[in-house]
Image (cartoon, grey):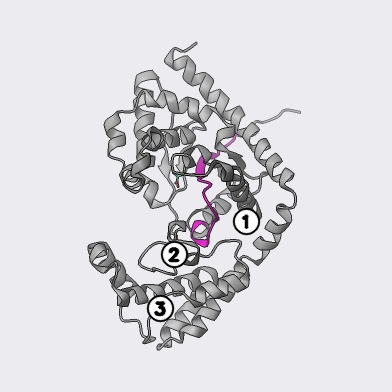
């Protein structure tokens, strides 16, 4: 019997990471986790997803809490449905090749490229007492995270665009100097809804604005209801601005409008409608929009119900999972082993090219 070798289609390599730094919320879910779940199910892609603990220590943090944060994030991702049979899930620091390649990339990265990273500027403004070298070098480690697997596709939010561009620059610099090793990494954006803070809807939902501003994935229905109930809205029931008009005002004059209570109220209502569209349905949201004045108490009840329903299975699965912490750590260890076998191959190639051994 002759075997005709099927021309095997190379899967596209997807790499993405998320920092462990507090409870995951529905903004994280809508912005990235949801895309990861889709990508792992697409046979065209081979996915590496990791918990970026080395990145997370560039900001002020409590060492005693870090391991728990890593565990919690892993439990979130697994309970949401990331499946170790379909993707490689691991902890960054379990694969030391990331930092090893990061060091080599440091030697081909111009300092001036890092000086213009907007995230570095933002973060060093926020933590002036702790502008450490790791914060500055963060994007180089991120490039290594991606290229150690020869990743071509990077599902990230738009805030990471500059970092993925740098990854391409670093690959070019390396390839020009040492020969063609690394591919061109491209960001993989998917349209994601912008979820706003419940307490200040002119800002993005984020853990930095406090627990009442967000819905955590593990929030129980009564907590969800309570938070949504006190979410900022306005008093007329009529939307005086379209969502585009609101966006327009905020992009043009964010500072001037930051404390404008009327605008805040309108943004809060649009946020409730976005939540309904995301976790309920577009029809439901359209129906409410068509029947102004909107009764906010009713809308809020509906939004809270839909969010609670959407994560009901997740909450059950997560509760079960955390009773078996050993199983979670084993999954991460097996993932690291898988990732390392790929990472080591890249490092062998890299070391040879750069003349180290
Ligand atoms: N910087 C990313 C963020 O904060 C996290 C991250 C670290 C990452 N390494 C990565 C994302 C590699 C994609 C690929 O969102």
Q: Nearer the viewer, residue 124 or 315?
A: 124
Q: Is residue 324 visible?
A: yes
Q: Nearer the viewer, mark 3 or mark 2?
A: 3
The secondary element bearing badge 3 is classed as: loop
What span is in magenta? 6-28
Residue 174: image location, x then y, percent: 38, 24
Residue 204: image location, x then y, percent: 40, 61
Dot placed on the residue nearer the N-terminal end, 3 or 2: 2
Q: Is residue 118 above or below residue 314?
A: above
The residue at which mark 1 appears reads as 80
The residue at which mark 3 appears reads as 233
Distance from Cα at disc 3 to Cα at disc 2: 15 Å
Q: Is residue 201 above or below residue 354?
A: below
Q: Nearer the viewer, residue 41 or 312?
A: 312
Q: Is residue 63 above or below residue 319?
A: above
Residue 118: image location, x then y, percent: 31, 45
Is residue 245 rendered to the left or right of residue 231?
left
Residue extending farthest to the right is: 1
Dot placed on the residue nearer the N-terminal end, 1 or 2: 1
Mark 3, other Cα within 10 Å: few <14 / some 14–19 / many ≥20: many
Q: Nearer the viewer, residue 227 or 63?
A: 63
The residue at which mark 2 appears reads as 195
Mark 1, other Cα within 10 Å: few <14 / some 14–19 / many ≥20: many
């Amino acid at each position: 019997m002759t075997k005709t070798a099927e021309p095997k289609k190379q899967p596209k390599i997807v790499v993405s990471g998320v920092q462990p730094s507090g409870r995951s919320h529905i903004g994280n879910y809508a912005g990235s986790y949801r895309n990861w779940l889709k990508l792992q199910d697409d046979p065209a892609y081979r996915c590496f997803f990791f918990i970026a603990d080395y990145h997370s220590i560039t900001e002020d943090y409590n060492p005693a809490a870090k391991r728990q944060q890593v565990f919690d994030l892993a439990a979130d991702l697994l309970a949401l449905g990331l499946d170790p049979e379909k993707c490689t899930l691991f902890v960054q620091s379990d694969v030391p090749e990331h930092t090893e390649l990061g060091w080599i990339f440091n030697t081909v990265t111009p300092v001036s490229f890092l000086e213009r990273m907007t995230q570095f500027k933002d973060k060093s403004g926020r933590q002036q007492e702790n502008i450490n070298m790791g914060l500055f070098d963060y994007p180089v480690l991120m490039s290594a995270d991606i290229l150690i697997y020869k990743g071509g596709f990077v599902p990230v939010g738009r805030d990471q665009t500059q970092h993925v561009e740098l990854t391409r620059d670093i690959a070019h610099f390396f390839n020009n100097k040492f020969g063609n090793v690394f591919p061109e990494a491209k960001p993989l954006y998917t349209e994601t809804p912008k979820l706003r803070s419940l307490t200040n809807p002119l800002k993005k939902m984020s853990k930095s604005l406090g627990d009442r501003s967000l819905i955590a994935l593990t929030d129980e229905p009564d907590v969800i209801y309570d938070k949504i109930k006190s979410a900022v809205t306005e008093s007329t029931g009529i939307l005086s601005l379209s969502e585009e008009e609101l966006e327009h005002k905020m992009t043009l004059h964010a500072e001037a409008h930051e404390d404008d209570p009327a605008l805040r109220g309108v943004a809060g209502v649009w946020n409730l409608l976005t939540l309904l569209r995301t976790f309920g349905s577009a029809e439901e949201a359209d129906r409410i929009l068509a029947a102004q004045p909107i009764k906010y108490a009713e809308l809020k009840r509906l939004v809270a119900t839909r969010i609670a329903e959407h994560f009901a299975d997740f909450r059950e699965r997560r509760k079960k999972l955390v009773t078996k912490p050993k199983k979670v750590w084993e999954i991460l260890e097996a993932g690291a082993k898988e990732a390392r076998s790929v990472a080591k191959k890249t490092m062998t190639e890299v070391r040879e090219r750069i003349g180290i051994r």
